[in-house]
Image (cartoon, rainbow, N blue to C red):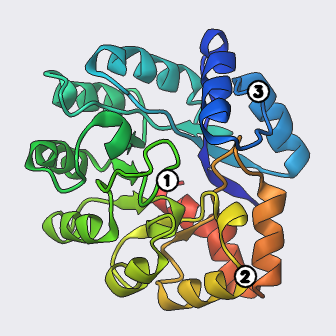
Amino acid sequence: MLIDFHVHCFPDKLAAGAVGSLHKASGYPYYTNGTLADTREKLDAWGVDKAVLLNIAVSPRTQHSVNNFAIEANDGQRFFAFGSVHPDAPDALQELDRLKAAGIRGIKLHPAYQGFAADDRKVYPIYARCAELDLAVVFHAGWDIAFPDARCSEPEQCEKVIRDFPSCRFVLAHLGGMERWDEVERRLCGKDVYLDLAFVGEAMQADRLRHLLGLHDPKRLLFATDCPWSTPPRLSALLDEAGITGELRENINHRNAEALLRL
């Protein structure tokens, strides 16, 4: 069993523009065309059994449509689509209620795209409501090529949020902080938070990955790729190189995701 906890796809009419603009901004190659159909086909070829789909409400205006797509894509079998709310949307808390009622299991937030800091007090009501509703909260964490100077979801900020909301199930993408590995080790490893492995197949060496994985709770690590920007075979190859096998590998590949998704 293999569950990819960090996959991006978009409505058909938006997919080409979304993937194309991100490719232009980053220079990264992409491995799907961003549509749900092509994502399903590629995941089949890569041996992925289930996937968590993540999108972001980049403005209050787009919040409702982003969540409509998530509700439509969320089949509860193959695809587990997360919603998103915008901290400046006046109906953000009501939108969380709508997502929960529709069977959505979590939300994705991206502080840089959405214009807030992870520990900004204006976002605290959203964390509190997610804790009440048992909705997982996935954060982009650390550096982002689209916002190279932004420091709004640093390990220090995420550590504060985890401390302030101990009952909320947080998932910090990119192993807790892309390109912030020393701070991740100092502030996040060993804490009660999930770390996903999105894009580390492109960004880390095997020895560094092995070291950080060894410092964290083996039940709080998630196989994740950031597809279409990386692929499951690339991450699997890095885990092989790092010598991650046995029960830890099974936990990473699917057991931890199953527990987090309440499967």
Of mark 2 and mark 3, the one earlier in the sequence is 3
- What quarter of the picture does the C terminus occupy? bottom right
Residue pointed to by mark 2:
206
> Where is residue 190 shown, x and y percent of the image?
39, 86
User: As drawn, is 228 to the left or to the right of 255?
Assistant: right
Q: Is residue 133 above or below residue 205?
A: above
| Residue 261 tag number | 1
The amino acid pointed to by label 3 is: Asn
Q: Disc 1 or disc 3, which is closer to the eye?
A: 3
Residue at the image position 20 percent from the left and 49 percent from the top: 127
Of mark 1 and mark 2, the one earlier in the sequence is 2
The local secondary structure at tag 2 comes to: helix
Quarter of the figure with residue 104 = top left
> Where is residue 115 shown, x and y percent of the image?
26, 37
Residue at the image position 19 percent from the left and 23 percent from the top: 89
The amino acid pointed to by label 1 is: Leu
**Mark 1 to mark 3: distance in Å?**
26 Å
